[in-house]
Amino acid sequence: MFKTDDYWEEEFKEIKEQKLNSIYFEDCIFINCDFANSYIQNCKFSDCKFISCDLSLSKLKSCVFNDVCFENSKLIGISWSSCDEPFNVKFDNCNISQNSFHLLDLRKMKFINSIIKDSGFEQCNLQEAIFDNCDLEFSDFYNNNLKKANFETSRNYLINPQINDIEKAIFSLPEALSFLKLLPIVIK
């Protein structure tokens, strides 16, 4: 499908692709595209939008996602850790379960109306990140900077304040009671 290595302001609909290598996309829109189980290497996505796409189980290597928005998309089982910086992504109404975010700079990142079950955030900078109405069941937060992160409308999180910096992070009741589960106490 992709015949050149540079695309600008193009719209791609219902594409099914298994391999993308060294392609630069700027200001492109992908609609109902199937990149599930694909291998994406050395690609750069800048100011792009993915709408109702499936990237589940894609393998990403040395890719850049700069000002990229995923809407109503399925992104299950992806490791974002091998992506290059800048990494600036917004997830809106997506399923990003079983994802790995390791050692990434995710400052001010927006996770909106998304399912983020069984995902791992390890040693990330999530300062001022927004988790708006997200389900974080079984997701793991380990050694992250969560300063001023906003979890106010999210649920099912279990964040250990002893191994994460949660200074001025925003939580709400009753979900904030999850912190009590981590204490060596009995509540009756």
Image: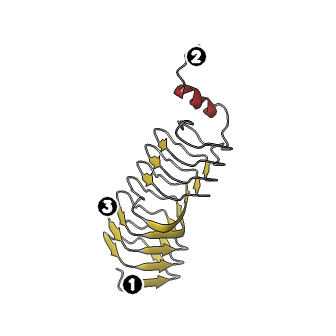
Look at mark 3 in the image and give the residue it sits on. Answer: 37
Quadrant assignment for the C terminus: top right
Q: List x then y, in percent, for residue 18.
A: 30, 69
Residue under label 2: 187
- Determine which residue is flagged by label 1: 5
Q: Work out whether mark 1 precedes mark 3 in sequence or the reverse, and give the earlier one.
A: 1
Give the distance between the C-alpha atoms of the residues marked 1 and 3, in whole angstroms: 21 Å
Query: Going 38% across and 65% down the picture, which residue do you hit?
Result: 34
Graded by Cα atoms within 10 Å as few (under 14), some (14 to 19) or many (20 or more), the crowding at tag 2 reads: few
Residue located at (49% from left, 68% from top): 85
Return the x and y of residue 183 as percentages of the image width and height: 54, 25
Crowding at mark 3 (Cα within 10 Å: few <14, some 14-19, many 20+): some
Dot 1, how many residues are within 10 Å of its Cα: few (below 14), some (14-19), or many (20+)?
A: few
- Mark closest to the chain's N terminus, 1 or 2: 1
Q: Which of 145 and 37 is in front in this view?
A: 145
Task: Specify the amino acid type for callout 1.
Answer: Asp
Give the side of residue 5 with respect to residue 146, left or right. Answer: left
Q: Position of residue 80 (x, y in %)?
A: 42, 59
- The secondary element bearing badge 3 is classed as loop
| Farthest top residue in view | 188
Q: Which of 82 and 91 is in front in this view?
A: 82
**Residue 133, disc:** none
